[in-house]
Amino acid sequence: MQIRNTSKGYGSVAIAFHWTMAVLMIGLFAVGKYMTGLDPTAPDTFAIYQWHKSFGFLVLGLAALRLVWRFANPSPALPKEMPAYQRTAAHLGHAGLYALLFALPISGWLMVSASPWGIPTVLFNVIPVPHLPVPEMLGTKAQAENLFKEVHELLGFALLALFVAHVAAALKHHFINRDAVFKRMISTAPARAETPRRS
């Protein structure tokens, strides 16, 4: 099994990070939109919010681990024939995705911390998470909560937009450019191709 990245492809760890976080973010976005229409005082609503927060913190933790793994295992090189503007767009898009994977959960954490309801956060009903300090300059707790709620929602739509652009670019590489950019994120075969075979 090819665990680490090579200059030609991704290893199994990077691929697992990529798809696990993609599924989690799609689920969190869908549940987040669903939650906005629920009665906040209903018993089931509390449970849904707790699960949403739990998986949000899981994404935050995975994003940190993924960033560490990326520094230890540089990404494969982009195709040499890619125009400079596409390379720049690809790098900016990846940087934006990483930034939002951190900013989105943290904005949700700040929103919960500012809430006048004072509802505790307990990850997966096991691990309590303390609230973050909220600057007094943001006004009352209700005002701060509304601010972070708007920020959280805007960041969610920004992530969705980058996600759609990311998928579109991957499909373009696969069906139009016919290169290995998409294939190397679903298989370790391109990475293994660089590994010398033992006789």
Image: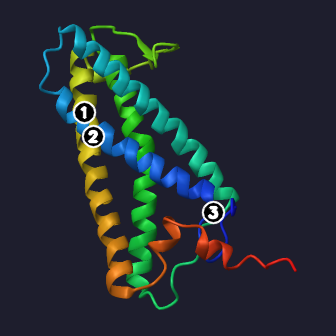
Q: Position of residue 119 (x, y in %)?
A: 34, 9
CB within 8 Å, label 1 to label 3: no
Read off the residue under disc 1: 32
Q: Residue at x 29, y 44 (%)?
A: 155
> Callout 1: 10 Å neighbours few (<14), some, many (20+)?
some
Camera-side residue of 48 and 131: 48
Residue type indicated by callout 2: Phe
Q: How is the image coloured?
A: rainbow
Q: Is residue 56 above or below residue 125?
A: below
Q: Along the polypeptide, which appears first: circle 3 or circle 2?
A: 3
- Using the numbered discs, state the Cα–Cα distance from disc 3 to disc 2 in whole angstroms: 27 Å
CB within 8 Å, label 2 to label 1: yes
- Using the numbered discs, state the Cα–Cα distance from disc 2 to disc 1 in whole angstroms: 5 Å
Residue type indicated by callout 3: Gly
> Callout 3: 10 Å neighbours few (<14), some, many (20+)?
many
Camera-side residue of 66 and 110: 66
Q: Which mark is residue 42?
A: none
Q: Is residue 98 above or below residue 179?
A: above
Circle count: 3
Read off the residue under disc 3: 11
Q: Position of residue 42 (x, y in %)?
A: 18, 9
* Residue 183 as seen in the image, left or right of residue 169: right
Marks 3, 2: nearer the viewer = 3
Camera-side residue of 8 and 105: 8
Q: Residue at x 38, y 82 (%)?
A: 85
Q: Confirm whether residue 136 shows in the render.
A: no
Q: Position of residue 187 (x, y in %)?
A: 54, 67
Q: Along the polypeptide, which appears first: circle 1 or circle 3?
A: 3
Image quarter of residue 64: top right
Q: Residue at x 57, y 49 (%)?
A: 66
Q: Confirm whether residue 43 shows in the render.
A: yes
Q: Secondary structure at mark 2?
A: helix
